[in-house]
Image: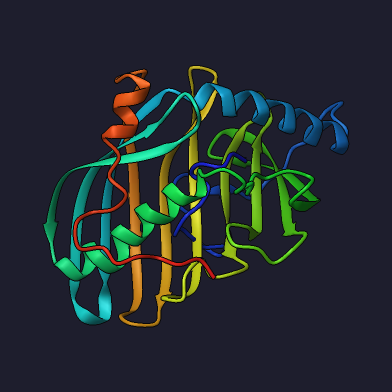
Amino acid sequence: MNKSLNFVLVLSASLVVGPELRAEEYAPGGDSRPEILERYFEASRAQDEKLRGLQMEMNFDARMPKLHKEGKLKALKFISRLGKITFNTLSFTGDTTIKKEVIARYLQLEQDSGGKGSDISISEKNYKFKYKKSTYIGDRPVYLYELTPREKRVGLFKGELWIDSATYMPIRESGRLVKSPSVFLKKVEFVRDYVIQDGIAIPKMIRSFIETRLVGRAELDINYSNYTRDAIPEVDAEAAALKAPEGASHVTAQ
């Protein structure tokens, strides 16, 4: 789906977070498989427009288990009416290595993913879709698809997509990035959960596992809350942009 949160240091094809998938399946009724995707693409196009002008609070909880380091950061994320992503850090507690090597890199990568020419949407142009089954997340019936990127490019992932059977919006995306977004990262896996609110799918939680070259394995949980629309004028939102917390080194996509 969409460019924004798409991306970004986030990860894990094999994980399950949030409500567990139920074992039993259900019949998809009169929906053909091509029709499911057609409705999903239509919902995604509408979604991109509705996300613009949205502000949300992000709470980061990052850990480096082997180094016994951790940190927590609170930030505001803005999606401008032009689709530009910016951040404003509100607070941080914990080890500065976590701030610099994990959270700051995530913020920079997500901001870069919203730039012009960076189409990493879940679309027919970027992915091959294979229908797997109809199942449930909690009590919510969903369609499950396997995704394979058409090329090895930064921001694309190999994994799975769960589509809500009522709205045809994404409920969950999970997988592994097929190309490292940075020379500092070896492997990135993620699970991203959405909640349907006010007619759009908005991020609820991301759980990521990252193998770094400098500091070993890192774990990153992000929880989203307090969504508001057009909280600040377009020009002010971009002026308030914080590319990454102070001390972050430059991230170069590879």
Q: Position of residue 58 (x, y in %)?
A: 30, 41
Q: Residue furthest left?
A: 93
Residue 56 visible in the picture: no
Q: Position of residue 244 (x, y in %)?
A: 28, 53
Q: Position of residue 162 (x, y in %)?
A: 64, 43
Q: Position of residue 114 (x, y in %)?
A: 50, 43
Q: Nearer the viewer, residue 248 or 228?
A: 248
In the image: residue 91, left or right of residue 154: left
Residue 78 visible in the picture: yes
Q: How is the image coloured?
A: rainbow
- Which residue is rendered at x = 79% and y = 50% of the image? 129
Q: Quadrant of the C terminus?
A: bottom right
In the image: residue 245, left or right of residue 156: left
In the image: residue 120, left or right of residue 106: right
In the image: residue 190, left or right of residue 117: left
- Which residue is rendered at x = 57% and y = 23% of the image? 49
Residue 228 against residue 86 in the figure, above or below: above
- Which residue is rendered at x = 32% and y = 49% of the image? 243
Number of marks present in the image shown: 0
Q: Nearer the viewer, residue 178 or 82?
A: 82
Residue 156 against residue 50 in the figure, above or below: below
Q: Quadrant of the N terminus?
A: top right
- Which residue is rendered at x = 78% and y = 59% of the image? 150
